[in-house]
């Protein structure tokens, strides 16, 4: 693709629409993918590890898939939690179009596929799940997480999957140092060379209270 990346806003590579069969939320479903998006031929290994090692999505509220691609995480969340509102967020317009097509084909009316700036500022998320775009670079990745993790509701979790050889352990250390007051960061699973990291937003204790371990 030359300089065209899956995190490009408007991929210049040929679309090459294709239909693939994947297993999401306990179901075999047909979805549409295309060139110029992340892992167009299958559910990539990192996302599969994340989906296999996270608890069922909360049944309601707002759920966030950060860097949604063609939608395996968003579609899984929407299938699991039909009464929740799923926000599928990406900068890649082709990816967002695919999520909308796939949601419509599966009869899922609870997915909003939007660019980051189109998510209302007053929404707090019951869960954040992401196979984040590590290859955008450390500064941009950190900025993305600093923007979205603080939007977790209290007693809510972010679940991230990162390849060990792409800096999962250093990212865990950065998360722990950055989100210290009111948060905890743990590694919850390892598989296929990937780490699943959980960031828990416990909330800020009232002034003068004692926080027990």
Image (tube, helix red, strand yellow):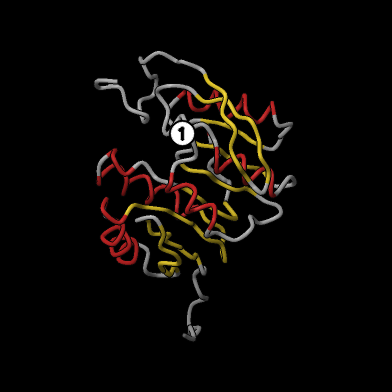
Q: Position of residue 192 (x, y in %)?
A: 39, 55
On screen, residue 164 versus residue 83, left or right, reads left
Of the pair 124 and 68, the residue shown nearer to us: 68
Q: Where is residue 188, by image quadrant? A: bottom left
Q: Nearer the viewer, residue 178 or 86?
A: 86
The x and y percentages for residue 38 are 41, 33
Q: Nearer the viewer, residue 165 or 172?
A: 165
Q: Residue at x 70, y 52 (%)?
A: 60
How crowded pointer 1 is (Cα within 10 Å; few <14, some 14-19, many 20+) is rated as many
Identify the residue at image location x=61%, y=26%. Answer: 100
Q: Residue 62: percent from the left, percent from the top? A: 63, 48
Q: Say which element carries label 1.
A: loop
Q: Which residue is mark 1?
A: 90
Vertical side of 21 occupied by 148: above or below: below
Q: Is residue 39 above or below residue 209?
A: above
Please give the name of the residue rendered at 39% of the width and 19% of the height, measured from the top-left corner.
10
Which quadrant: the N terminus?
Answer: top left
Rendered location of residue 180, percent (x, y): 37, 68
Instruction: Specify whether 178 is left or right of 112.
Output: left
The residue that appears at 30% across and 66% down in the rendered structure is 177
Q: How many marks?
A: 1
**Relative to the observer, which residue lies in front, 101 or 64?**
101
């Amino acid at each position: 693709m030359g300089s065209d990346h899956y995190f490009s806003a408007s991929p210049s590579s040929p679309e090459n629409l294709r239909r693939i069969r994947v297993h999401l939320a306990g179901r075999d479903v047909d979805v549409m993918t295309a060139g110029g998006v992340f892992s167009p031929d299958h559910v990539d290994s990192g996302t599969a590890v994340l989906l296999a090692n996270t608890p069922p999505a909360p049944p309601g509220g707002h759920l966030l898939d950060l860097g949604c691609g063609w939608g395996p995480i968003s579609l899984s969340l929407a299938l699991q939690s039909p009464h929740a509102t799923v926000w599928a967020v990406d900068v890649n317009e082709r990816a967002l179009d695919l999520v909308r097509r796939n949601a419509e084909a599966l009869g899922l009316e609870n997915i909003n596929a939007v660019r980051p700036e189109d998510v209302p500022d007053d929404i707090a998320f019951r869960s954040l799940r992401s196979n984040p775009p590590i290859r955008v670079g450390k500064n941009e990745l950190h900025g993305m997480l600093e923007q979205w993790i603080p939007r977790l509701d209290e007693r809510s979790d972010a679940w991230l999957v990162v390849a060990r050889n792409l800096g999962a352990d250093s990212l865990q250390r950065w998360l722990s140092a950055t989100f210290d007051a009111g948060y905890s960061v743990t590694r919850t699973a390892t598989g296929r060379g990937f780490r699943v990291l959980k960031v828990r937003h416990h909330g800020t204790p009232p002034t003068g209270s004692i926080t027990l371990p």
